[in-house]
Structure formats: structure tokens, C-alpha cells
Image (cartoon, rainbow, N blue to C red):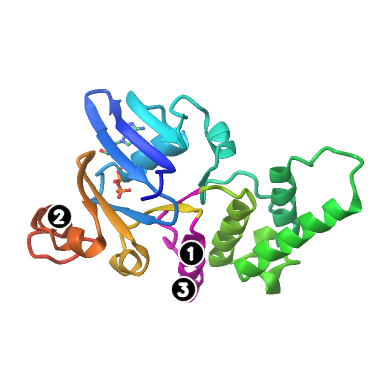
């Protein structure tokens, strides 16, 4: 088995007397897409926030490729390869889609402020930007200002900007939320493509069961902040304890 790229050890956060994430031990590996499910208020987003650094753990650890990142800021974690979608602040609404992607590629390359550099490096950056533009199927709208894009295309642009950061760990929190049905397949296809790159680890918080079924290699279930189940999708979704707390006693999906 490959080494885990990301590990949480007894990861815990308390808000006053409420333990929102309670001693969660989990390992995530490259080439694997894990969907995190659980009822409303189970602690899924809080768990994500603890991994990406938006929240500081009360106790426990987050380890990325053997390096403890628990105390690092979100931006330092991003430099360590943790990429969280749909939380990006580096979108320039007035600039075109392509310019936004080019800037993200340039920022990641660390070349932003170098005045003199070989022309070949510009070509390389431009080629990368084109690649992400194509991968996210935004070629037709490349010259439109980012602000003019419909919601579904904005989400795709956010994925393109995330890809430009070349993270090892991709984190998506309900990637198709609020998206029209015609945009949904594109975003799901994009996530499926990312997961085919066996060097990437993908984490997804999702409520929609059809999305879970389409993408999950593995499912973890949180309930009251605790890790209730962890395993192959069929195994987890058919376990009685999960059916009781997550799907409801009737076995019908709650969300
Ligand atoms: N900043 C905070 N201060 C106090 N309580 C919080 C805070 N953030 C989350 N919580 C509480 O922690 C618990 C877990 O919330 P969280 O948003 O992680 O659940 P979730 O599983 O993502 O739910 P949903 O599916 O509804 O998004 C909830 O009881 C929530 O009220």
C-alpha cells in the first residue's frame, strides 16, 4: 500500500463545551478519492477546516507527507500542497478567464516579480494556462471577464485556478451545490479526471448520493464529530449503523 499523503491523528476541536470533531484518526492516500458524508452538523466542514487551516485544532495533529502542519496558516498549508476549492480569494473579476488562469500559474511558479527571464519560461507558463483552460472546458469563454461567467463556469474557473496551484491534496466541499443540472456533469468529470492522476489525493464533502456513488473510492462517515465508519462505498453504505444514523431508519437518503 502507498504511504499516506495526509494523516489526521486524534484530531479534535471544541467550541465551548461542544466537541465538533472528536479524535478523528484517518489516513488518505494518493490515487484515492474519499467522500466524507454524514448528517447535517456532523462535523464534515469543520473537519475540512481543520485540514486546510481555517480552524485551529484544540488537540491532535494534521500531517502532510510526514510533516506536521497542524499549526501552519492556510496559505502555508497551501504551499505544502493542500488545495481547497471554492475558497479562493485570488480571483480577479475584471480580468478575463485566461488572464486569471495565467496569473495563478505565474504565482505558483514564483516568477511573479522577476523582471528578466527567458522567453521560454513565458511560453511554458502560457502553455500550462492553456492546458488548465482546456481541462476545465473554458476555452469558449477564455476572453470573457471572470465576473461575466455563469455560476457553473465560475466554479470551473475556480477548479482551473486550483489546478494551477498544482496541489497534491484536492479538497472539494459540495462541488455541485447551487449548480444547474447542465453544468454538474462537467464539474464531476473534472474531479474524476483529477482522481485519475494517481499522484493526487482527493477529499470531497458531499450530500448528494448520486455524486457519492459516481466518484467515491472510499467513504468515511462522521456523526456527532466522530468517525463512525470508514471503508469501501458498498460496505459502508450497506452497514446497519450507517443506515440508521445517516440514511434514516427507513433506509432512504436524508439529503
Ligand atoms: N465556529 C463555530 N463556533 C461554534 N460552533 C461551530 C462552529 N463551526 C461549527 N460549529 C458547530 O460544529 C458542528 C459541526 O458543524 P459542521 O458545519 O462542521 O457540520 P457539517 O457536517 O459540515 O454540516 P452540514 O452538512 O450541515 O454542512 C455543528 O454543531 C456546528 O454548529
Residue for point 34% across, 62% down? 216
Q: Quadrant of residue 127?
A: bottom right
* Extreme residue toward the front, this view: 1
Q: Residues within 10 Å of mark 1 (few under 14, many from 20)?
A: some
Looking at the image, residue 194 sits to the left or right of residue 59; the answer is: right
Q: Is residue 57 magenta?
A: no
Residue with the mark numbered 3? 185
Q: Quadrant of the C terminus?
A: bottom left
20 relative to 172 in the view: left or right: left
Query: First in sequence: mark 3 or mark 2?
Result: 3
**Relative image position of residue 208 (x, y in whole percent):** 31, 64
Residue 196 numbered mark, or none: 1
Comparing labels 3 and 1, the label whose residue is closer to the camera: 1
Magenta range is: 169-198
Dot 2 alpha-carbon crowd within 10 angstroms: few under 14, some 14 to 19, many 20 or more: many
Q: Is residue 190 above or below residue 14?
A: below
Q: Marks 3 and 2, how far apart in space?
A: 27 Å
Amino acid at each position: 500500500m502507498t504511504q499516506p499523503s495526509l494523516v489526521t491523528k486524534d484530531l479534535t476541536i471544541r467550541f465551548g463545551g461542544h466537541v465538533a470533531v472528536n479524535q478523528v484518526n484517518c489516513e488518505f492516500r494518493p490515487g484515492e478519492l474519499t467522500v466524507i458524508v454524514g448528517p447535517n452538523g456532523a462535523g464534515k466542514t469543520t473537519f475540512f477546516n481543520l485540514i486546510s487551516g481555517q480552524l485551529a485544532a484544540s488537540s491532535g495533529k494534521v500531517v502532510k507527507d510526514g510533516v506536521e502542519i497542524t499549526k501552519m496558516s492556510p496559505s502555508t498549508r497551501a504551499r505544502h500542497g493542500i488545495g481547497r476549492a471554492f475558497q479562493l480569494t485570488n480571483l480577479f473579476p475584471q480580468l478575463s478567464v485566461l488572464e486569471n488562469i495565467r496569473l495563478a500559474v505565474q504565482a505558483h511558479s514564483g516568477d511573479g516579480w522577476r523582471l528578466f527571464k527567458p522567453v521560454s519560461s513565458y511560453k511554458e507558463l502560457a502553455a500550462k494556462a492553456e492546458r488548465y483552460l482546456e481541462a476545465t472546458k473554458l476555452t469558449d469563454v477564455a476572453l470573457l471577464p471572470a465576473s461575466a461567467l455563469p455560476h457553473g463556469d465560475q466554479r470551473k474557473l475556480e477548479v482551473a485556478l486550483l489546478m494551477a496551484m498544482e496541489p497534491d491534496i484536492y479538497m472539494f466541499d459540495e462541488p455541485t451545490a447551487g449548480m444547474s443540472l447542465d453544468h454538474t456533469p462537467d464539474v464531476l468529470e473534472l474531479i474524476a479526471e483529477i482522481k485519475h492522476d494517481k499522484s493526487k489525493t482527493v477529499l470531497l464533502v458531499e450530500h448528494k448520493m448520486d455524486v457519492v456513488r459516481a466518484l467515491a473510492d472510499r467513504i468515511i462517515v462522521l456523526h456527532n464529530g466522530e468517525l463512525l465508519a470508514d471503508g469501501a462505498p458498498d460496505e459502508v453504505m450497506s452497514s446497519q449503523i450507517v443506515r440508521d444514523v445517516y440514511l434514516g431508519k427507513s433506509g432512504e437518503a436524508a439529503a
